Each structure stands twice: as structure tokens, then as C-alpha cells.
Amino acid sequence: MSTPFYVSPQQAMADRAEYARKGIARGRSLVVMQYADGIVFVGENPSRALHKFSEIYDRIGFAAAGKYNEYENLRIGGVRYADLRGYTYDRDDVTARGLANVYAQTLGTIFSSAAEKPYEVELVVAEVGHEPEGDQIYRLPHDGSIVDEHGSVAVGGNAEQISTFLDQRHQDGMSLAEALKLAVQALSREANGSEREIPAERLEVAVLDRTRPQQRKFKRIVGRQLKRLLEADGAAATPTDAPSDEEEGES
Amino acid sequence: MEANPRSTGRLPAAFLTPGSSSFMDFLGEHSPEMLPGNRNLPPVQGAFEAPHGTTIVAVTFPGGVVLAGDRRATMGNMIASRDMEKVFPADEYSAVGIAGTAGLAVEMVKLFQLELEHFEKVEGAQLSLEGKANRLSTMIRSNLGMAMQGLAVVPLFAGFDLDRERGRIFSYDVTGGRTEEQGFAATGSGSIFARGALKKLFHEQLSEQEATTLVVQALYDAADDDSATGGPDVARRIFPIVTVITDEGFRRLSEEESSAIARSVVERRLEQPDGPRAALL
């Protein structure tokens, strides 16, 4: 039997953080940003079945980078939390701030508990307001901290570089097509400075659209509508709700 | 440290355990006291009165289905509410209308809506229409104890079946028994009279406009002969709630639309109090 030797708490935490960061960095980055009518989620995702973005509640969306089974667990936990809270009180009492807090507590406890391995995930919880000023975006790193973000945020492998790129270019009141293009541009930049093309089929895009008449504001943008937005010349295009072939994958 | 779910501590383990996509199953495991079916009722002697919702009718037409309800809730001889809403969207492609004990029925609808939404969010796909109808069956059955004490809930469920591309209607009995109805259905105290009207006026090729008028006619006839069903109240501008579900989803007729239909029905009845006549042969 080997003798347990002393590891300083600083070193132990640094090792765990390093472990989590490496895991997150293996995943592709994703971007969440505000546009005129809401909040758009853009990421590269070759899979059509495993989503990085999803609906938590009426006005709340969820995005995650890192290990799928871990963030999927957190996502379902969040849906259960939100639905139970809305059932107990009222739909208006489910807020992104409350949810972000619960996630932070959960991630923080797991991160600092020696019995569990740290989760290799970084989450974004976003809530679309009735007005652009009411939009909220929270980034939740692996260690249980909460960062209140404005305008745009990137998480995942290349997040820092993408964030800097977006911070310089993102403006308030961009149209959906403009915001989408900027996001794709940011995602296509490699760490070494080169660029590559991301075809529309490999993009996962969703919006929290405050103009949507339904109570539930989350909507996936797929197929023709996505192509049309990517081709649009900046202005005009906004997500429309009508054609049923574009409603597929709504969740 | 497992926190109370109503506070903002860490998510309890039950929240992060992979398992059922059903909200009711989750509720049953995590906080069973919140499930309506798990309540213990003290034995009641004699009649117990609580507001009751009355008549709901549904009619299919080639593009979908119409579900409508009157606005009255009664408690014995008294009108408990003149403007109660008894038809609710269950999700984007289905709706449920409730008759029976109003308080319990509204709670059941709330849980049913959440059940469908929860499944959709967790699984990323909607339940089939049959699946939704079966879930509702289970919920009614869990209310059986209350039903036997006189607090029954009997809904009518209608939806657009995206696979079969047509509107469908399901009716229930107090024990949760489910029947698919062909063409039209009615539930609640005025349903006997409403069904009579529907039977004489329904045909397979109704337009949406005709179907919405037909349900209002049927509700008028129910109100005519059943004191617990409320007719269109022109003075107070309280009109039946009429909803239409097609492949474009659920739509509730605006107040202007439903009042226009109700007013035209009332107007015709001024000349012909018994309503439109079906041919004798």
C-alpha cells in the first residue's frame, strides 16, 4: 500500500480546474448573442440528434459545451426544476437568474467535492425579456461561478479568441441575419488564425424570439430558413413562424 | 447537501437522475404529495357542493377539429361563475375541454399541459395524439377516489393528428375509460341536448366556418334545456369559447369572431326559437 502524500489544497483545486478545462476545450465552441428581437444560439454541431441548445422554459434557453452526458443531465435537471417551480408557483416565477443560481450551486458543489469528478462542462443560461434591456445571459463555468454577460458570449474550446472577436464587432440592435453571420464568422476562425468554412448542415441554430406570439419563445432554426438567413444581405430577414416544414425539431 | 427545490440550493439528486420523461413520474418520485391523486380525503357524509363546469362539445371537419364550451359554472342551484373558461390548449396541436368539478379539472388541465410540454422538452419530440390521450386517461383514473365521492372530472380531448392528418376527438368516463368519437361528441350536464343537436346537423363535409357555427348551435340547444349550461349572454358580452385545431396548430377564436357567430345564432333563433330544422326524411 502506498503512503498517501500531502497535496496542497491550491494544487488539488488547480488540478481539478485543469482537468475540467481540458475536457471543455475538446468540444467545439458555441456562441450566444443578443440581436434586435431576442437571443440567438449558434454552434457547430455535426449531430442532428444530440443538441447543444435547448428550451428550458417559456423564455429561457440553455446552451452547453463539453461532455454530452454531463450537460444533458444538467439540462434535464434544469427542465425539471423549471417545470416544478412553475407548477408550484406560477410560470412568471421561473427566471434565468434562479436557474443560473441552482446550476452554479450544483456545479460548485460537484467541483469542490473530493468524492466526485468535476463536470467537464460550461453552460450558458439565457432569458429573453419583453424589451432588449430585459435580456439576460449568464455564463456558468465548470467551477460554479456565474458571469453575467452582455451582448455576446462564447464557450468551449476556442472561447477566448472568439469572445474577443465578437466583443469588437457585436452591436446592439443587429438583425438576426447579421447576428447569425457574425457568429458563424467568429466560429470559423481557428486558433492558429486561419479560417475554415462551416456548411449550413453542420450548424445548430436556435433563437429565443420575443416577437413570437406563443408563450414559448424558443425555436430552432433549421433547413431552408437557416439557408435563407445565411444568404440574406444583412437586413430584412427575421424569423417567421408560419411554414410547418420549418417547425420540425421544435422542442 | 440536498436543498429544498423551492429554494436555490444545489439541484437534489432526483433532478439529475436519468429516468422518465414524464413530469408526473418525476413528481411522484420527488414530491408525491403534490400529485392530485395522492391526496387523502376525509369521508364525506351527504352532498358536498363545489362549482361544476358544464357543457363541452367537439366537431371534426375535413381540415381539423373544433372544440367549444359554454361559460357557466354552477354550484347546486346557484350560478357560481358566468364567465368561466373551460377549454384550454393542451399543446400546439391539441386542446382539452373540461366538465365536472371545476377546481380539480383546472388543476388536472394544468398538470396535463405540463406533462406534454415536459415530455417535449426532455425528448425533443412531441407525443403522438394517442399517447397524449392515454396520458389523460391515466390522470382521470388517478382521480377515481374523488370521483367516487362526487368530485368527478370528465374532459373531452381533441387534437389534430399529424400522422393521420385529421382532427380526432376522444371522450372519457369517470374511470378513465377512453373512447374515440367519430364526427362529434359532447360531455357535461347539457351534453344530452347538445348531442341531439349535433346529431341532426353534423355532416362529413362541414367547412371550418360551418363547424364553428354548429358547436355554438349545439351549445345554444344545451343551454335551452339544461339550466346548468349558459347560453350566449349578449347583455354582458359573454360568449362561448370556440377553439379550432388544424395542421397549423391551435387557435382560439377572438372575442369578435365568437361573438359574431353567437350573435348570428341568437338572431336566427328570434325567428325560429328551436333552431335550424333537419329534413324529416
Image (cartoon, rainbow, N blue to C red):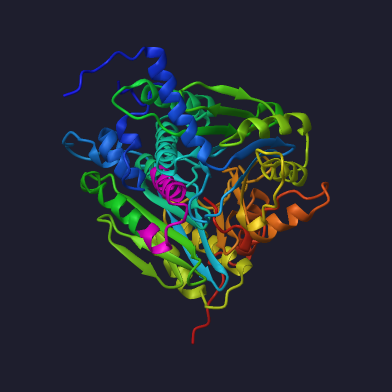
Q: Single out the residue that lies furthest toward the front.
A: A2
Left or right side of A80 for A149: right
Is residue B244 shown to the viewer in this render? yes
Q: Residue at x 50, y 45 (%)?
A: B85
Q: Return the x and y of residue A37 as percentages of the image width and height.
A: 72, 39
Magenta span: B109-133
Left or right side of B203 for B171: left
**Image position of A83 with respect to A184: above or below:** above
Is residue B188 shown to the viewer in this render? no
Q: Main secondary structure of the magenta part?
A: helix
Q: Residue at x 49, y 52 (%)?
A: B91
Q: Residue at x 42, y 62 (%)?
A: B128
Q: Residue at x 39, y 69 (%)?
A: B181
Left or right side of A61 for A111: left
Q: Quadrant of residue A211?
A: top right
**Image position of B205 with respect to B263: above or below:** below
Q: Return the x and y of residue A162 as percentages of the image width and height.
A: 67, 35
Q: Return the x and y of residue B66 as percentages of the image width and height.
A: 53, 62
Q: Return the x and y of residue B96 as percentages of the image width and height.
A: 44, 54
